[in-house]
Amino acid sequence: VVWNLPATGITPFLCAAYTKSAMNKAMPMMNLPATTAIITCGIIAGVYPGQALFTQQARIDASSLEPEFQDCRTSSGAKVAEFTYNKGL
């Protein structure tokens, strides 16, 4: 919802309002650039907050990984029970 709402829920209303505005009637050739700018702003307004909702760090138990990672040890010799990784969003 966060990703889609600014781009598909709000921009049609803004584009319709611009189409009916005096500025559009005075300069109809600016309709395409203005519509493109409105849609671009809507996409940007949705993507970054949408990404921020999801954590970038994740954890996984060593027991659910391949056998070569299940018996890893730290530098102090303790068995690693859980791995933390970056999702790379």
Image (cartoon, rainbow, N blue to C red):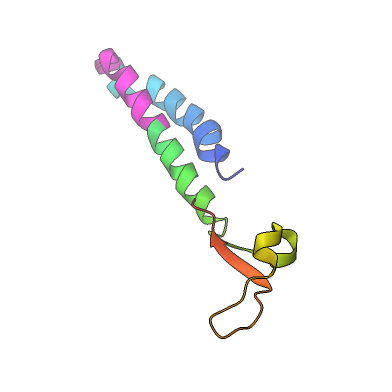
Q: Is residue 89 above or below residue 78?
A: above
Q: Residue at x 70, y 66 (%)?
A: 70
Rendering coords of residue 60 (x, y %):
67, 63
Residue 76 placement, left or right of 45:
right
Rendering coords of residue 64 (x, y %):
74, 60
Along the line of sight, the residue nearer the viewer: 70 or 31? 70
Q: Residue furthest right?
A: 63
Residue 46 inside the magenta-drawn segment: no
Residue 30 inside the magenta-drawn segment: yes
Q: In the picture, residue 42 is in which quadrant? A: top left
* Residue range of the region highlighted in magenta in the rendering: 25-39
Q: Residue at x 42, y 30 (%)?
A: 39
Q: Is residue 53 above or below residue 17?
A: below
Q: In the picture, residue 62 is in which quadrant? A: bottom right
Q: Is residue 10 above or below residue 73?
A: above
Residue 8 placement, left or right of 26:
right
| Count of numbered circles on the image | 0
Residue 28 placement, left or right of 55:
left
Q: In the picture, residue 29 is in which quadrant? A: top left
Q: Is residue 15 visible?
A: yes
Rendering coords of residue 86 (x, y %):
52, 59
Rendering coords of residue 47 (x, y %):
48, 43
Q: Is residue 61 visible?
A: no
Looking at the rendered image, the quarter that the N terminus falls into is top right
Along the line of sight, the residue nearer the viewer: 30 or 63? 63
Along the line of sight, the residue nearer the viewer: 4 or 35? 4
Q: Is residue 70 above or below residue 30?
A: below
